[in-house]
Amino acid sequence: MATLVNQALGKKVSYKHFCAVKNAFITDQTITYGQILEAFKKHPSISKTEVLRFFKREALVGPEALIEGQAIFRTHLITLIEALEDWTGRKMTDDNNPWGPLEYLDGYTISIENIAEFFATGEGKIAHILRNHLEAENN
């Protein structure tokens, strides 16, 4: 279906990138051609609601879940964030950090809702922390 949608839209959205985040766009039990079409039309954008849906389906966590809590394992969280990075082109992980790609967020209260806001808008609490982290790293 992804090939047909790409042909219909004249796009080249990677099926690999879409497959990793497809649960963000499914509103029922299965994904329809129309849902894939809408997702590919707005690629690389994703809404806050879609990111929250993605975390609900993939990790069984809601917007209030904290990343430092026991609601989601760090490795699973990183996998989901990397899938969102691939889809949106927004970078939240720090691949150069020897302590882990999300270590710069330790000490902050970060919720799934904060992550959703970051991937939907590129702004919010995470964007602010990330800017400060990158500035400190470059100085």
Image (tube, rainbow, N blue to C red):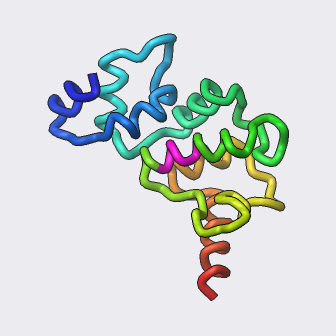
Seen from this angle, which residue lies furthest top? 29
Q: Is residue 98 above or below residue 62?
A: below
Q: Position of residue 83 (x, y in %)?
A: 50, 43
Answer yes or no: is residue 125 visible.
no
Q: Position of residue 114 (x, y in %)?
A: 67, 48
Residue occupying the point 61% across, 28% down: 58
Decide whether residue 46 is among the magenta residues. Answer: no
- 16 vs 118, left or right, is left
- 10 vs 41, left or right, is left
Residue occupying the point 35% across, 42% down: 43
Viewer-proximal residue among 21 and 116 = 21
Q: Position of residue 24 (x, y in %)?
A: 50, 30
Residue occupying the point 31% across, 19% down: 34
The residue range painted magenta reads 80-85
Figure quadrant of the N terminus: top left
Q: Is residue 111 above or below residue 134?
A: above
